[in-house]
Image (cartoon, helix red, strand yellow):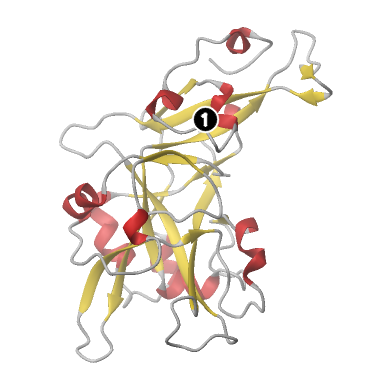
Amino acid sequence: MCGRYASSASPDRLVEIFEIDEIPDLPGVGSLVPRWNIAPSEPVAAVVERTDYDSGDVARKLYAPRWGLVPSWSRDPASGPRMINARAETVAEKPSFRRAFATRRCLIPADGYYEWYPLTRPDGTPVVRNGRPVKQPFWIHPLARPGEPNLMAMAGIYEFWRDRSAPSEAADAWLTTCSIITTQATDALGLIHDRMPMQIRRADWDAWLDPRLTDPVAAHDLLHAPASGEMTAHRVSTRVNSVANDGPDLIEPDTDSDATAGDAPR
């Protein structure tokens, strides 16, 4: 899965990279700032394309949906934070995701993401502290590519939920949420965690975002699972465990003693 990630590009930088036409005045958009410890239920930067109902023109926009998708048919938005990820294997069929996958796909920019690996002793028993298994956090990120922005465009879907108890013109009448599509982790990354975010190649950004593409098979073909040599990982400090901690130091290689405890991927 992907349950914590970093996105340090400013809105202005995202406009440049993704050729965004508009930054609408929507809840959360004005508060988007560089973050290195983004957690579920928080607003996140997402690139979308929307069709103008009057003109029919399609515009690329920067949204700030809450991370944790709430289906439009939900009675209550409280279930959203649990739907932070959508499995690529079932995203086109699962009722919670299939409508969004068909017409509301987005790109979620990230520098990389975190996963936690349970440490074990040489005999295979888990390392335990204060009665709980000890897990080593890893920072997983794309390798630098010549001529490409040093970020990953995670494949996402987004949805609108309407609060029927509020007037339609009220600022809080609509809630926009999103989910990150994941797949089976590949190569060495699978030793850290069995799931990983799917990405969209730069050449496929236009097709992925196009709301006129409603064929789920064609959309699914655009999903990209990074191959060997595209991503790398290193251990980081357990400070990332707390969502209260933020800053670029969180992605620096770990020099703490926990980094050598037990058996973990290297």
Nearest to the observer: residue 130 or residue 197: 130
Q: Quadrant of the N terminus?
A: top right
Would residue 188 be seen by someone viewing this image from the given angle? no
Apparent side of residue 71 relative to residue 201 in the rendered image (left or right): right
Nearest to the observer: residue 58 or residue 205: 58
Apparent side of residue 214 relative to residue 148 in the rendered image (left or right): right
Residue 47 percent across, percent down from the top left: 32, 60
The image shows a total of numbered marks equal to 1
Apparent side of residue 70 relative to residue 109 in the rendered image (left or right): right
Residue 238 percent across, percent down from the top left: 58, 23
Would residue 120 be seen by someone viewing this image from the given angle? yes
**Picture quadrant of residue 59:** bottom left
Q: Residues within 10 Å of mark 1 (few under 14, many from 20)?
A: many
What residue would you read off at disc 1? 189
Residue that appears at 30% across and 49% down: 201
**Picture quadrant of residue 43:** bottom left
Residue 129 percent across, percent down from the top left: 78, 18
**212 up-or-down from 139: above or below:** below
Residue kind at label 1, given as amino acid type: Leu
Residue 65 percent across, percent down from the top left: 44, 62
The local secondary structure at tag 1 comes to helix
